[in-house]
Image (cartoon, helix red, strand yellow):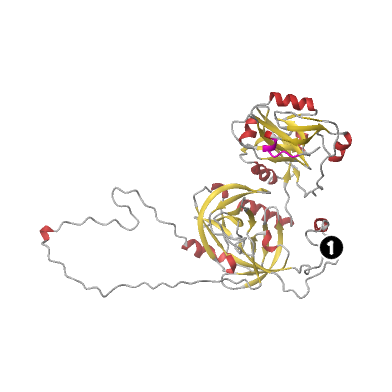
Amino acid sequence: MNAKADFDLVPPLRSPLAVLALAVALAACSRDTSAQQSQPAAVPAAAAAPAPAAPAAGQAAPGEPAMRALPDFTQLVEKYGPAVVNVEVVEKPQPAPGQGLSPNDPFYDFFKRFGIPAPDQGPRAGQPPIRGAGSGFIVSPDGYILTNAHVVSDAETVTVRLTDRREFQAKVIGADERTDVAVIKISASNLPTVKLGDPARIKPGQWVLAIGSPFGFENTVTAGIISATSRALPSDNYVPFIQTDVAVNPGNSGGPLFNMAGEVIGINSQIFSRTGGFMGLSFAIPIDVARNVEEQLIKTGHVVRGRIGVTIQDLNAQLAESFGLDRPRGALVSSVEKDGPAAKAGIQPGDVILGVAGHPIEHYGELSGAIAAMKPGSETTLDVWRGGKHLNVSVAIAELHEQQQTAARGAHPPGSPATTPAAFGLTVRALTSQEKEQAGTQGSLVVEGVSGPAAAAEIQPGDIILGVNGRRVRSVAELQEAARSAGKNVALLIQREDAQIFVPLKLP
């Protein structure tokens, strides 16, 4: 049985009655004063050998490696702790139990997606308001505060509490779900603020410090090290997360992550956990990403992002070898939007984007973040790997708009007789013109059965075959020819429902 592990947003502390059982063990430190003291025999001064001098505190003895003292965070906390705040939220009334539609109802997503009130939906009757608590930090003396979007989502009232116990009602200036960054504002002046740092200068192994309100314990300090940088999490390609082993728990959401210089380098946002609590893996949003979102939310109330109209995926060693790369790197283009900026620039499925504007792309998530940060209407240059050669392609940046997902399509009905390219372990048949129109595909072959390498790669019946190693295949004969000339590693481009993806096949 495989254990399930999840990436979770660090939830704000929910109440009412969040009960914490605290077991406090008090240990007395005693000295034994009952032992008899004996006087040692006198030793002539001449016979007494001089004892070697003990090394000073924090210094190594002669011949031993140098020792470094552990970091002291007290000055940092004293100076910047007052700029960290507790954020309390009362959520808007939700439908009462039994009212509205169940999440299992087939029309639930329809009403939710388009914001239409579900039938019989109404406020909670006789239910207490839902309360939550998170963290935040002051970035300007006049009261602008950064926190997580999930802390203030669905908030009816937001209360900010300072370390001096003053409380203010806050206004939500804006929230961006893609980056999980929100800006709130309190009416005050001469407030303490944090100093912002540069996440590009951080390295794994450096000490970092978090301040927040885990489980409602305000201004709790926890420390650790940076575990990794530029982490791409599942279903999140717009934030190159900072991974740390700093203890982060419910209520830490939105709190700052400091470096040893006292600069905020990130906002604590997510944890990897199988229990819902801290397990040594926490993730912070780099402060430069948050600052860009903050400026746009304050100025316009929303965030504008760039796009070029491609679907990308990561490369493993098999895919890299299939495309002639020396090692896995870059972002593999699996589909190109018709008439989009990338299509107009000549980008094709099977291209590997290795760099943007002169900056190398190691992991595919870096491409999404780099393009999203660019201004719509501008142009950039892509370093593209195609057919074993580097190409410089100029592409225009368009504005990213939220797109509705289309419904998944079922399996295709039987058509012409199936044929089997034995090397791949695929049984395929040609699609009829009606099936192609129904599926909205430019492919011509549908998978009927799998075995061998195809089964190991988790190819499924109903997948549509589009290409092999970056070359389009439009007939059974072309697929058979590709199978005969393929090497040990094959990149098979398929369409599954409405998505295109390269799947690596390892041939015997």
Quick check: 227 above or below 57?
A: above
Task: Give the magenta part as a residue range.
Answer: 454-460
Q: Is residue 128 above or below residue 437?
A: below
Disc 1 secondary structure class = loop
Q: Which residue is mark 1?
A: 118
**Residue 254 falls in which quadrant of the image?**
bottom right
Looking at the picture, tell me which residue is in the foreground, 28 or 191: 28
Who is closer to the viewer here, 416 or 488? 416
- Front residue of 483/56: it is 483
Q: Residue at x 29, y 47 (%)?
A: 63
Residue drawn at x 16%, y 67% is 40
Q: Amino acid at mark 1?
A: Ala
Tell me, yes or no, if residue 444 can be seen here.
no
Residue 293 screen position, x and y as percent: 68, 54
Q: Is residue 70 magenta?
A: no
**Coordinates of residue 374 in the picture (x, y in percent):** 69, 44
